[in-house]
Amino acid sequence: MYNGTRGPVHITVRFHKPQMQSSERPEDNSQHQRWLWYVQAFELVKSKRFKALHSSHALLLEVDVQKAFCAGAWLSTIVLATAAIEANIRQIEKQNYETKVSLLFGSDPELRWLREIRNEIMHAGEPGSQSKLWKVDGHDISQTHHALEQDAKRVVKLMFRSIYG
């Protein structure tokens, strides 16, 4: 019986491929296209060196990242994928559960960008300050949300590299 503890896990299958249950397959074509992109992004990483040990926490978060991404929830995708990357670094790469994430991510420019955009999502900034989120003029929420898709894709790729690369 499982004792409810968390920790690194060995994946028993050769490769973990993001899957949806047949009841979860998106009916909406845009959701299906996002799901296809997600699987292709995973496939690009899996062809490289594949780790044997994975963060159980990161894998659990990845399930929700996939659902958020396919639904077009870009901010949720970014926040959850950042959490998965942090979990993987803490649990697998560094075994460090105390250090601030800014130090944990080090000087890697991609991880620095990721931390900055995640922080901007989680903490409102002063009006008129520089923003990585507001990508269009006029504070058009719909257009800004649409523009965040590219950032969400960038973060998903970073997550796959962190967990599986």
Image: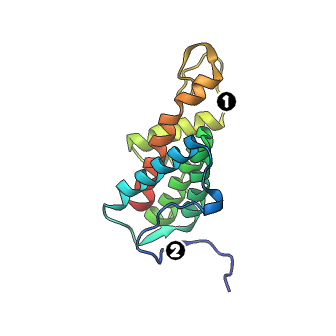
Q: Which of 158 and 74 is in front in this view?
A: 74
Name the residue: 54% across, 32% down: 148
Q: Badge 1: few (under 14), some or many (20 or more) residues near its Cα, within 10 Å?
A: few
Q: Which residue lies furthest to the top in this view?
A: 138
Q: Residue at label 1? A: 124
How far across and how far down the image is residue 136, in percent? Answer: 54, 19
How far across and how far down the image is residue 40, in percent? Answer: 41, 52
Q: How is the image coloured?
A: rainbow
- The image quarter containing residue 110 is top left
How far across and how far down the image is residue 107, in percent? Answer: 39, 43
Left or right of 162, for residue 146: right
Name the residue: 52% across, 50% down: 35
Q: What element carries label 2?
A: strand
Total marks placed: 2
Residue 22 in the image: above or below residue 146: below
Name the residue: 58% across, 23% down: 143
Q: Would you say the residues marked 2 and 1 are in contact, meaning their CB atoms lie under 8 Å apart?
A: no
* Kind of residue at badge 2: Val
- The image quarter containing residue 30 is top right
Looking at the image, tell me whether mark 2 or mark 1 is earlier in sequence order. 2
Q: Residue at label 2? A: 9
Q: Which residue lies furthest to the left in this view?
A: 48
Q: Which of 101 and 120 is in front in this view?
A: 120
Quarter of the N terminus within the rendering: bottom right
Residue 86 is at least partly visible in this image:
yes
Nearer the camera: disc 2 or disc 1 = 2
* Kind of residue at badge 1: Ala
Q: Which of 121 and 101 is in front in this view?
A: 121
Quarter of the C terminus within the rendering: bottom left
Q: Is mark 1 on a helix, strand or loop?
A: loop
